Image: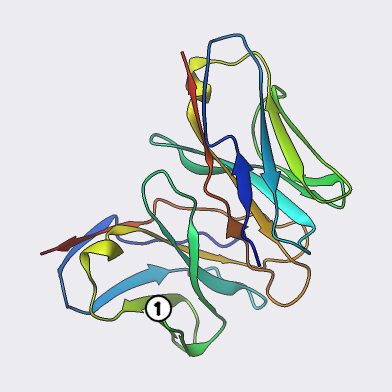
Amino acid sequence: LAKTTQPISMDSYEGQEVNITCSHNNIATNDYITWYQQFPSQGPRFIIQGYKTKVTNEVASLFIPADRKSSTLSLPRVSLSDTAVYYCLVGVQTGANNLFFGTGTRLTVIP
Amino acid sequence: KAGVTQTPRYLIKTRGQQVTLSCSPISGHRSVSWYQQTPGQGLQFLFEYFSETQRNKGNFPGRFSGRQFSNSRSEMNVSTLELGDSALYLCASRGTSGTQTQYFGPGTRLLVL
């Protein structure tokens, strides 16, 4: 699985848009990009997944440039409840591949 | 659909004991993976089961084992518990179609005294 690099932490004020960028220079042709959110003492929660260009759901947007060597998770108008650790994962989620979780990005939303 | 469930949610054991954790995947999912999460090491992959067979294994000692039943429910066992085994143990299941996204359960918090 391709390894990823994310900022260790970020702070944001309530109501702002937050963008978390993840680098994955060794992404393979078949790899998807997946983001998870994790609150303390809970399991990671799937947020969004994409392969290229832009994906949007009710929670977030995922922007992937043409070379796919990075991706940006965008959280619109964050609230205090968005304070969590966000993990970016890259890989083919088929066959016998397990997930490699890096350190993630600890997002703190400030009132 | 109901999500991934794990039992028990919390557990306290003493060194040398053994423990068995249980995971019920999302209905229709045949793959179950186990992860250990500690503050120092983060989230680490233990093993994955698919159709009752272990098909992938992380870098953990043999004290950590698992199995999967015909209904896809899985159990994880840790024998001869050590203090360092205190962690949040997470189970994730995934289907066999599409991008096979993994969905996690709430975890079992194990404390070894």
Residue A74: horizontal and vertical position, in percent? 33, 79
Residue B13: horizontal and vertical position, in percent? 54, 16
Residue A73: horizontal and vertical position, in percent? 37, 76
Residue A66: horizontal and vertical position, in percent? 49, 89
Amino acid, disc 1: Val
Q: Which residue is mark 1?
A: A59
Outermost left residue: A111
The chain ID associated with circle 1 is A
Q: Quadrant of the N terminus of chain A?
A: bottom right
Left or right of A44? Residue A11 is left
**Image: B82 above or below A8:** above
**Image: A56 above or below B64:** below
Q: Nearer the viewer, residue B25 or A100?
A: B25
Q: Residue at x 46, y 61 (%)?
A: A4
Q: Quadrant of the C terminus of chain A?
A: bottom left
Q: Residue at x 76, y 56 (%)?
A: B31
Q: How many neighbours does mark 1 have within 10 angstroms: few (below 14), some (14-19), or many (20 or more)? A: few
Q: Residue at x 22, y 70 (%)?
A: A79
Q: Nearer the viewer, residue B23 or A9?
A: B23
**Image: A108 above or below A77:** above
**Image: B48 above or below B7:** below
